[in-house]
Amino acid sequence: MTMRNASEEARQTPAGHGFSMPAEWNPHAGCFISWPCRELTWHGHFENAKRAYSAVVKVIDRFDPVTVLADRLTAQEARSRLGPEARIVEVALDDSWSRDNGPIFVRNEDNRVALVNFRFNGWGHKQPCEKDDMLPILLAERLRIRRYDAPMVLEGGAISVDGDGTLLTTEQCLLNANRNPSMCREEIEQALASYLGIRKVVWLARGLEDDMTDGHVDGVAGFAMPHVVLSAHTDDDSDSNYRNLKENLARLESATDAKGRSLELVSMVQPKPILVGGVSITPSYVNLYFANGAVVFPTYGIREDDIARETLVSLFPEREIVGVRCEHIGIGGGDVHCITQQLPTGESLYP
């Protein structure tokens, strides 16, 4: 590619058009949640998963209008469980993780909103994903919103942004050979800059142990406000996550954001893995959702729930802190953040 062609290509990206990914705590026009449709995901707890999803939908809908994406075969079930007021959109799905297989929305200074279509390969070819890979394309058509096609695989749970130019991720996931084997670290950083409008990447080491996503950052850390990071932490050196979290903490303590500011760290209690219906899950209180005027966080019926709530109440005194039971969502491999995707406020830019 010539220098001139490369420059022209850069101008056709979201960043070249003045777009960037807003922070998740910015105002939302709505939230997308996909209804469970793949029974194998839930290891014999399919009905419990549906009840947990229903609870999350109803809680978030108090603050952000929720649109439920449902496969044709499960749309009627979603309507009957969620009630006649539920907003249901039928769309082909392989699974139900809107954070990862859905679009990522970007916004410009004129308050115009577009979406970015990153490729989705089933978390490194672990399960069927042809339908899920098409989801951003189908939503762009339904929403009549401009779509940018990014030249890399990326799941939304693999990143956290501060809306101020900084992106947080893990080496374990983004540098994994099962995602973008032909791209080096610098090329991945450039693609993130071009398509999400960020200027700096802070690389953590790893996510939670035995995480089928290969270490998504939303299980261990995430921006809570500019230069403030919620970081999962344990002092128990017998915990299987102790080393990973300690290494991540060391990196965060030495990092600066895109504006050169040191990061302020807020420790979020990290429980040991627990058994739910014979299945081991690792709770993650960092895996939460910022709604309009609220923080919706996962709970598991354990003593650490109250510790996590106290941390969030102290950090976000202006927001309502709402817990929702998520242990059966955890059986499938995620929590509140994993099953949600926010739509920022603004006017859709089309085409």
Image: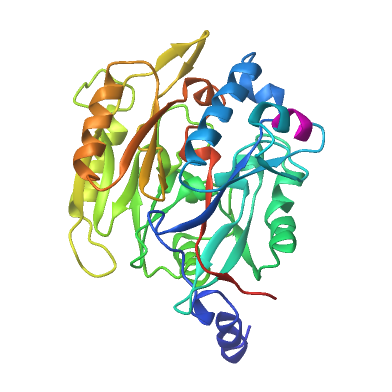
* Residue 175 in sight: no
Q: Residue furthest right?
A: 73
Q: Residue at x 66, y 68 (%)?
A: 145
Q: Residue at x 24, y 49 (%)?
A: 252
The colour scheme used here is: rainbow
Q: Quadrant of the C terminus?
A: bottom right
Q: Residue at x 56, y 89 (%)?
A: 3
Considering only vertical position in the picture, is 145 above or below 156?
below
Considering only vertical position in the picture, is 325 above or below 286?
above
Magenta stretch: dominant secondary structure:
helix
Spot occupied by residue 166 in the image (x, y as percentages of width and height): 34, 63
Q: Residue at x 52, y 81 (%)?
A: 16
Observer-nearest of 319 and 175: 319
Q: Residue furthest bottom?
A: 4
**Viewed as shown, does residue 60 lie left or right of 311?**
right
Spot occupied by residue 9 in the image (x, y as percentages of width and height): 61, 81
Observer-nearest of 38 and 305: 305
Q: Residue furthest front?
A: 84
Spot occupied by residue 313 in the image (x, y as percentages of width and height): 23, 38
Range of residues picked out in magenta? 74-78
**Viewed as shown, does residue 123 lie left or right of 138?**
left
**Viewed as shown, does residue 256 lie left or right of 190?**
left
